[in-house]
Image (cartoon, grey):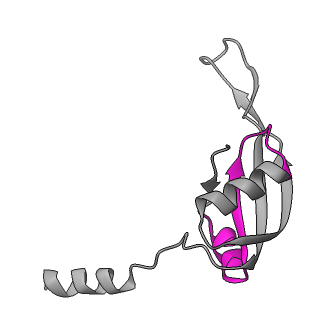
Amino acid sequence: MITLIPRMSEKAYAQAQAGTYVFNVPLTANKAEVISAVETEYAGVKVKDVRLVIQNGKVVRAYRGKRRNPGTAARTDRKKAYVTLREGAIELFKEDSESSTDGAKEKK
């Protein structure tokens, strides 16, 4: 069983409105593991399609002092799973519009 971490970004939110959900998954995960993990973690959901993308780590400059050991370092690689559902929906982005407006009224 793999762990699914939902990606919280504007692009992921827009795709979730269209029925495609984005998750961070381990680099060793494959499509079958992602499908079984989504269907067991979120009840009442059937997966239609899974696309896996490996995002290579960005090479960044690393300095240790003014003139000492200039060089580069690489960020870690990431793997993302784009999951399209056949039926059902996942509540990843909970909208707190009611609670945020109530909180503003209480402060006044």
Looking at the picture, how far across and down is residue 105, in whole percent? Answer: 19, 88
Q: Nearer the viewer, residue 65 or 90?
A: 90
Is residue 48 rendered to the left or right of residue 97?
right
In this image, 68 relative to 28: left or right?
Answer: left
The residue depicted at 64 percent of the width and 51 percent of the height is 4
Which quarter of the picture shows residue 43? Answer: bottom right
Residue 46 image point, x, y percent: 73, 72
Q: Give coordinates of residue 75: x percent, y percent.
A: 72, 34
> Which range of residues does the magenta coloring cover?
9-31
Q: Is residue 107 magenta?
A: no
In the rendered image, the residue lying farthest to the top is 68
Q: Position of residue 31 (x, y in %)?
A: 84, 53
The count of marks equals 0
The foreground one among 79 and 84 is 84
**Of the pair 43 and 107, the residue shown nearer to us:** 43
Q: Is residue 17 magenta?
A: yes
Quadrant housing the C terminus: bottom left
Above or below: residue 8 compared with residue 20: above
- Residue 64 lies, with reference to residue 88, above or below; the image says above
Tell me which residue sits at (68%, 62%) in the image.
39
Answer with the quarter of the image where residue 64 lies.
top right
The reply, left or right, for residue 3 in relation to residue 55 is left
* Vertical relation: 44 (above or below) 50: below
The N terminus lies in quadrant? top right
For the point 60% across and 73% down, the residue is 90
Q: Residue at x 85, y 54 (%)?
A: 52
